[in-house]
Image: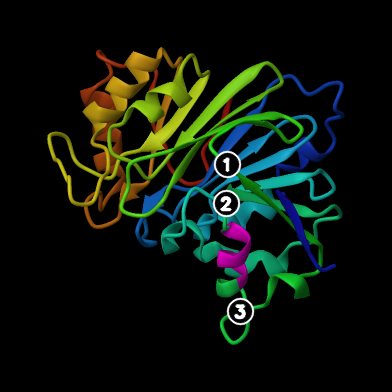
Amino acid sequence: MVQGTGVRGGIALFFHLSRTTWKKMQVTFLGTNGWYDTLTGNTCSVLVRSGDYNIIFDAGNGIAKVDQYIDQEKPTFLFISHLHLDHIAGLHTLNKFRFTTPLCICGQVGITGDLHAIMREPFTVPLDALPFPVRFMELAEGTHSIPFQVECRPLVHTAPCFGYAITLDGKKITFCTDTGTCENAIILARNADLLITECGLKPGEKSPEWPHLNPEDAINIAKKARARRLALIHFAAHTYTTLEERFEIERKYQKDSPCLLAATDGLTIEV
């Protein structure tokens, strides 16, 4: 269902790349913290740039930096996993952007009403008062062409939460956060060129009452799914208090998972 609401360095190089010369997708980790911002990073948001589209996963406070990386004339799709504040608080900053085509916000059925309830006076600038049009796309579980292919499946969390797998330019990128270990995460990550998932817990920790993954859980999902690369984000701010703790995860599991990456804010990789 589609509904409408009213009507920069080396980074500048990307603005001059034509669609015909764009070789690989670029993935930039805008926010890699879970729960709240600290000196280690902002809350969760990931940007995928292709030759034709800007694709953003989640709108934690990291999304405020997206205009440093994108061409705002390209069609932009924002996928919201769920409504916990560390995944949507950055919507408050949408008013700074100047998209020249409608921003398409995608999420579970009901997201239109949910976000209109949050993005309104007296809390922030309402969606229909932004300096660009906003369109909503409510997605049921399954595979959709919107126009690129996206697969949506529910994950295991305390609030209704979707994981996404997009297939574009011959590549598959999967985004699964927040979640505990579940079959749907494996299905979404199957043969993915890049699996982006969470690492809210330290090695060996479990949290059945508030489902999240530890590094072993994430690695097991990637292995079962035969994902080619694994990037960890959503490091719980109160658990991973330094970046060095993230890098220690890379060192600890390098032999078992050589393609493992512990993401940090501002990191860009090619897929």
Read off the residue under disc 3. Answer: 124
Residue bounds of the magenta highlight? 111-116
Queried whether the magenta region covers residue 115, the answer comes back as yes
Helix, strand or loop at disc 1? loop
| Mark number, residue 140 | 1
Q: Residues within 10 Å of mark 3 (few under 14, many from 20)?
A: some
Q: Is residue 250 visible?
A: yes
Q: In the rendered image, which residue does mark 2 sit on?
A: 109
Q: Which mark is residue 71?
A: none
Q: Is residue 70 visible?
A: no
Instruction: Please give the name of the residue rendered at 51% of the width and 38% of the height, measured from the top-left corner.
Output: 267
* Distance in Å between CA atoms under marks 2 and 3: 23 Å
Q: Which quarter of the figure is the C terminus placed in?
A: top right
Residue at image location 77% in from the left, 33% down from the top: 147
Q: Earlier in the sequence, mark 2 or mark 3?
A: 2
Residue 3, position in %: x, y? Answer: 75, 57
| Residue 115, image quadrant | bottom right
User: Identity of the amino acid at label 2?
Assistant: Val
* N-term mark: 1 or 2: 2
Q: Name the kind of residue labelled 1 in the image.
A: Ala
Q: Amino acid at mark 3?
A: Thr
Q: CA distance from mark 1 to mark 2?
A: 6 Å
Q: Which percent across, then down, holds residue 150?
A: 62, 31
Q: Which of 107 and 246 lies nearest the eye of the viewer?
A: 107
